[in-house]
């Protein structure tokens, strides 16, 4: 068996070494392949109060993993990306089990950092879901466990929930606790969490579109000062609809749009890491290339990112649904949820994840799934010029 790392640094940077899946699986079927010592390593940063060093690039499981052996996991491990971001519901509920299958085969199931998350946000439900995750992952302990997709900051007032978290930590079932969030309440949640000692880490939407947001920046400062580990997600700032908008990004140097916006996130020292849902070896390879290269973005790169942000602003929803949903509230009895619906369109059209798009949409109340109305008031209300009418037309086609 050939245990040599599949990629040289030169290959990573030029992307000339992209091989077919079939070609790269074979050399990794030995456990030692997960520890290729001379492969370029992704740098690590400390994750807040956990004190643990994690890679700055995290392997997201949103797109799911191969049931038997996923070469993306093996390649990620070779480059020090030994952190998998899973969730109970990712990939139709298969993410945890499939990740464990590959890790077990590589004999690193207990040596790889696994974060998982659940959508039960009450104490007993949270405890039950942790037990299900432990069984799916075939582990006695999970490194970090999140409340998945928190929107309402009041959840953090739930003493029963926090008591359950403490109990799970004491029992060793989870080592650290936190939550993920991506809607309009991110800044509020970060600020509130700073005063709750039980919260160790937060994964939140953070990308080049939000750098100038003063409220968010103040909230990040507050959480960072409280030593909460901060993980960026949705770093690509994807547009609501498939518009080939990424083509508007002008490559000024060696970085692609995907690499440039990741490097932009890593340039913020308050952020420990960025999670990326990489559904192909090529994407993984490009992200690793950006992570292992310590060259910083130049002025031209930053200007290109800013121009791209401006050019695509009207297609990117920030999740501040209280603004646009209120504008059409009278017509809907307050039930419409534009932000979540547009996020579902993005899952479908940009991430290519129709299953997730339909699942998240189906979890909305029935009244919120009735999209047969005039959304033009939302167009006028949106401060970012998002064409809600057009995107809701698209939502009607693909989600209802
Ligand atoms: S459409 Fe506009 S107002 Fe509504 S959530 Fe998106 S960015 Fe905010």
Image: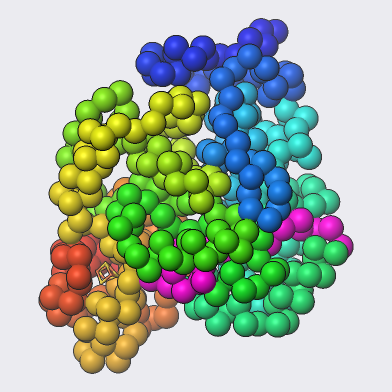
Camera-side residue: 106 or 16?
16
Please report the bounds of the magenta region as a residue range: 171-191
Q: Nearer the viewer, residue 299 or 386?
A: 299
Q: Is residue 391 visible?
A: yes
Quick check: 133 above or below 301? Answer: below
Colouring style: rainbow
Image x and y of residue 328, in percent: 22, 84
Verify whether residue 369 appears in magenta: no
Above or below, 38 relative to 141 = above
Q: Is residue 176 left or right of residue 148?
A: right
Q: What residue is drawn where x is 30% and y is 54%?
A: 209
In which of the image's four quarters is ligand 1 placed? bottom left
Place of residue 53 in the rendered image (x, y in percent of width and height, measured from the top left): 67, 41
The answer to whether residue 116 is above or below residue 218 is above
Residue found 18% across the figure and 44% down from its top = 307
Q: Residue at x 38, y 68 (%)?
A: 215
Residue 287, quarter of the rendered image: top left
Q: Nearer the viewer, residue 160 or 195?
A: 195
Q: In the rendered view, tell whether residue 77 sits above or below residue 222.
A: above
Quadrant (top left/top right/bottom left/bottom right) for the C terminus: bottom left
174 within the magenta span: yes
Q: Quadrant of the N terminus?
A: top right
């Amino acid at each position: 068996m050939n245990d040599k790392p599949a990629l040289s640094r030169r290959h990573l940077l030029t992307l000339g070494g992209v091989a077919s899946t079939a070609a790269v699986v074979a050399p990794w079927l030995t456990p030692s392949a997960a520890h290729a010592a001379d492969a370029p390593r992704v740098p690590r940063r400390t994750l807040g109060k956990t004190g643990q060093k994690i890679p700055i690039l995290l392997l997201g499981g949103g797109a799911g993993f191969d049931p038997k052996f996923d070469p993306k996991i093996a390649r990620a491990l070779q480059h020090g990306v030994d952190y998998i971001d899973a969730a109970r519901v990712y990939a139709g509920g298969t993410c945890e089990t499939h990740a464990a299958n590959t890790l077990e085969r590589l004999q690193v199931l207990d040596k790889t950092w696994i974060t998982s998350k659940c959508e039960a946000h009450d104490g007993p439900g949270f405890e039950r879901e942790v037990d299900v995750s432990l069984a799916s992952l075939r582990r006695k302990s999970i490194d970090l466990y999140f409340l998945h997709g928190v929107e309402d900051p009041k959840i953090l007032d739930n003493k029963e929930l926090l008591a359950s978290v403490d109990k799970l930590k004491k029992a060793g079932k989870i080592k650290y606790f936190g939550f993920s969030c991506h809607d309009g309440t991110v800044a509020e949640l970060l600020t509130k969490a700073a005063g709750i000692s039980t919260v160790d880490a937060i994964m939140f939407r953070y990308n080049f579109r939000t750098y100038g947001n003063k409220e968010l920046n103040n909230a990040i400062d507050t959480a960072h000062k409280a030593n909460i580990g901060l993980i960026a997600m949705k770093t690509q700032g994807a547009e609501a609809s498939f518009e080939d908008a990424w083509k508007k990004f002008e490559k000024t140097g060696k970085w692609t749009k995907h690499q440039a916006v990741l490097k932009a996130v890593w340039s913020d020292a308050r952020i420990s890491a960025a999670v990326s849902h990489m559904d192909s070896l090529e994407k993984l390879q490009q992200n690793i290339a950006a992570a292992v290269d310590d060259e910083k973005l130049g002025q031209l790169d930053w200007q290109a990112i800013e121009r791209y942000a401006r050019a695509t602003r009207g297609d990117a929803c920030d999740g501040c649904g209280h603004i646009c949903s209120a504008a059409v509230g009278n017509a809907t009895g307050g039930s419409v949820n534009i932000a979540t619906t547009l996020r579902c369109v993005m899952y479908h059209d940009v991430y290519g994840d129709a299953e997730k798009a339909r699942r998240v949409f189906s979890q909305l109340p029935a009244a919120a799934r009735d999209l047969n109305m005039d959304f033009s008031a939302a167009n006028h209300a949106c401060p970012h010029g998002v064409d809600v009418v057009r995107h809701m037309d698209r939502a009607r086609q693909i989600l209802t």
